[in-house]
Image (cartoon, rainbow, N blue to C red):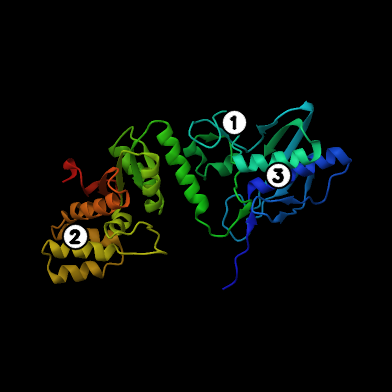
Amino acid sequence: MRALREGFTTGSCAAAAALACCLWQAEGECPKRVEITLPEGRTFAPEIVPHEGGLCGVIKDSGDDPDITNGMEIIARVEPLSEKGEIVFLPGEGVGTVTLPGLKIPPGQPAVNPVPREMIARAVRSVYGARGAKVTLSIPGGREVARRTFNPRLGIEGGLSILGTSGVVRPMSEEALKDSLYEELKMRVVQGKKNLIFTFGNQGEAALSRLYPGACVVQVSNELGFMLDAAEELGVSRLLIGGHPGKLCKVAAGVMQTSSRYADARREAIITQLALMGADRALIQRIYDCPTTDAAMVLIHEAGFDAVWGKLARSAQRYCALRTHGQIEIHILFTDAAGQILGGTMEETQ
């Protein structure tokens, strides 16, 4: 198998662009390339795109990672001050502003995370020493692209974030997704919301928001186990985990990473409970042969075994309680594709 090529973060690109901007001002000529040292120790030496007014840009290269910002340009403008002072960050076109508490950056600040801030400050200081400076970062097209990211959920308005911890993008890494999921959960807890709903995606969020208007719904994608660990760490007191049987049946079998790349125990979970309920072998075989969970749901309903969803919910509840060491009150709710309740662990769903 071909080794996947690594790329570089928006934070690395922003730091390199800021350094080029400073060198252009100090030396009178825009450098074709600059070299910076990344937090993990390696060097990054991208080509510099000069812009009118002394601004410098770097084109984001995410390597073989399917990063939504791949190919976008991160542009820096640096305005040095005459006296000693701080490096102040300003949001330009396409860079978002934090509006809610609970993130790494306080409300009112541009969405430039701590490590990129340190990298950019180091780049500016390497040219201007202790002098203060204003650094404006822009990502043309960032406002539109940000709508397809977690930023709107995190209260980051107006564009993308400047991210990165190591400075390197590792292909197919799930760490960036986990970071985003964790940040949203932490933000909700900081806001005082410790009674939450977990669901897997947009369909589940829409259904549960209709069923529980005003409730705080957090998407966990396929990372339920990771998010249960985070919920315990952050002090969440009560969770309702809701969604389609296609995901929740895996949880009922103890599977906490619900991507099909890792495990699939949907049929096994369903037929185990049906067998315990006394379903005959012919029905169990038909369920086992179903190509999808939706197809199995039809057969289950026709055979009069709708109570299986409550039993699966209790099984999922037990596994989730074990994962969180009994520290969180947990309930499970199965819903169909139309958002209708199939069964759950709360009294009103029995």
Q: CA distance from mark 1 to mark 3?
A: 18 Å
- Judge left or right: residue 265 versus residue 188: left
The residue lying at 16 percent from left, 62 percent from top is 274
Secondary structure type for disc 3: helix
Residue placed under numbered mark 3 in the picture: 15
Question: How many numbered marks have been drawn onto this rendered protein structure?
Answer: 3
- Judge left or right: residue 182 versus residue 10: left
* Residue type highlighted by circle 3: Ala
Q: Residue furthest right?
A: 28
Q: CA distance from mark 3 to mark 2?
A: 58 Å
Residue placed under numbered mark 2 in the picture: 300
Residue placed under numbered mark 1 in the picture: 109
Q: Are marks 1 and 2 in contact (CB under 8 Å)?
A: no
Percent x, y of residue 15: 70, 44
* Residue type highlighted by circle 2: Ile
Q: Quadrant of residue 136?
A: top right
| Observer-nearest of 340 and 184 | 184
The residue lying at 28 percent from left, 55 percent from top is 245
Disc 2 crowd, CA 10 A, few/some/many (<14, 14-19, 20+): many
